[in-house]
Image: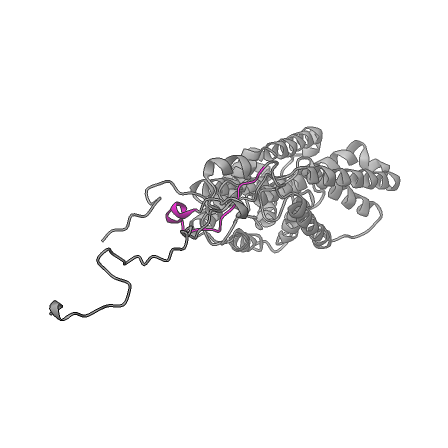
Amino acid sequence: MAYDETGRDAPAEPSSGVPAAVLENVFDDPLHGEPGRDRIAVHVVWESVLLAGLGGMAYLLWRENADALRGDGLKSLLVDAVALGLLTLAAGLSLRAAAVNLAVGPVAVAAALHVAEQGDRGLREALLPALVVAALGGAALALAVVVLHVPAWAASLAGAAGVIVYIERRASPVVVQGTYDPRGTAVNLFAGFAAVAVLGGLFGAVKAIRRLVGRFRPVADPARRRGVVAAMVTVLALVGSTVLAMLAGVLIATNGTGPVAPTSGLDWSILAIGTAMLAGTSAYGRRGGILGTLIAVSLVVVFLAWARARGWTVSRWAVGGAVLGGGLLVTRLVEALGRPRTPTGEAPELAPAGDGTISTGWALTRSGPVDTWPSVLPVQAEETTADPWEAHRWETGPQRWDADDR
């Protein structure tokens, strides 16, 4: 015996019960989103606060050491900003895709050690193998995340452990062998970083792009797969973040005045992820600002330069922990004030999550007001004394028995 189940052959509807055509225009995430679309005003306000902080910190640095903001000091500061900026872009890209890459710091240190050792062969000869290894490593990490559908932080932490094993093969710091000096093109490098950061923020503000990049963000059970498109975007984000981290390592090695120390690099990861979150990128994915990355990176770099000018010995662990703590507060701010606003007009009424396509055929229509409901009781006829079983040959009076009737 077969059951005629409504909607079995129809395309799947969202779990909210609202038609997909309506959700496409009303919801930022058409399948499981909240009513309305993400708000950007909170990012603009927060970036204004960051800009004011950058101006104040630059003034303090100017008063402490004016040479740090001009000449060779400014060039070195710009290269430092690009190095941290590439790491922050790597962390921010993975955060936007809801697949944070904790291995960006170890990858940067490993690339710095490689370039320091192989720099005498030429920058291109040293850079190409590192680029290939970074792309393959990022692809392996991405496949582990999307195929097994495991948390990216755990998979990237395992990858970071493997990179740290490569780093610990060196018992002492490595002197840079090459002659490449990025300070000669510091202005161009910083302009390129600024353009990528701002354009990335502008594109991320577009609803379709923001929705696409953050498609891996869980909306219900985090162990539930988000589809092929989300997997492909996550693969690109993790590969891109690993390559950006490798490029940051090249600048870390070539801009320094001493040898490259074989550290774990996790302090760089914390600093980069904290700076990305401080810039307004949500730790949950998808949401992010426009100018926040550029301003936050500049603020952290100027603060470190100011601390050195005052003779302080500041650990990257301390700065990274403080920035990450502030970034957590910013994430709460972004998620609380950046979530969708209730759309104007009548919002669609959401039904409880159903059981897929079968439940869509049982959606109840919205009833009218209570006072207009029709009466459910039948109208009674006027009361009558006549017996409904009475017929013309039945007598209602007393019965008489005659002998003739026998």
SS majority, magenta: loop
Relative to 136, is 401 above or below?
A: below
Relative to 121, is 152 above or below?
A: below
Relative to 288, is 160 above or below?
A: below
Q: Position of residue 17 (x, y in %)?
A: 46, 45
Looking at the image, the residue that sits furthest to the right is: 63
- Specify whether residue 361 is painted magenta: yes
Q: Nearer the viewer, residue 167 or 384?
A: 384
Colouring mode (rainbow / by chain / secondary structure / one colour) = one colour
Relative to 312, is 254 above or below?
A: above
> From the viewer's perspective, is 65 left or right of 252?
right
The quadrant holding residue 37 is top right
> From the viewer's perspective, is 274 left or right of 303?
left
> From the viewer's perspective, is 314 left or right of 389?
right
Q: Nearer the viewer, residue 182 or 141?
A: 141
- Specify whether residue 72 is painted magenta: no
User: Where is the C terminus found, in terms of image quarters?
Assistant: bottom left
Q: Position of residue 230 (x, y in %)?
A: 47, 42
The residue under the point 41% across, 52% down is 382
The residue under the point 40% across, 51% down is 381
Q: Position of residue 239 (x, y in %)?
A: 51, 41
The residue under the point 49% across, 44% down is 366
Tell me if I can see residue 130 in this picture: no
Q: Position of residue 115 (x, y in %)?
A: 59, 41
The quadrant holding residue 289 is top right
Identify the magenta region. Answer: 346-363
Tell me if I can see residue 284 in this picture: yes
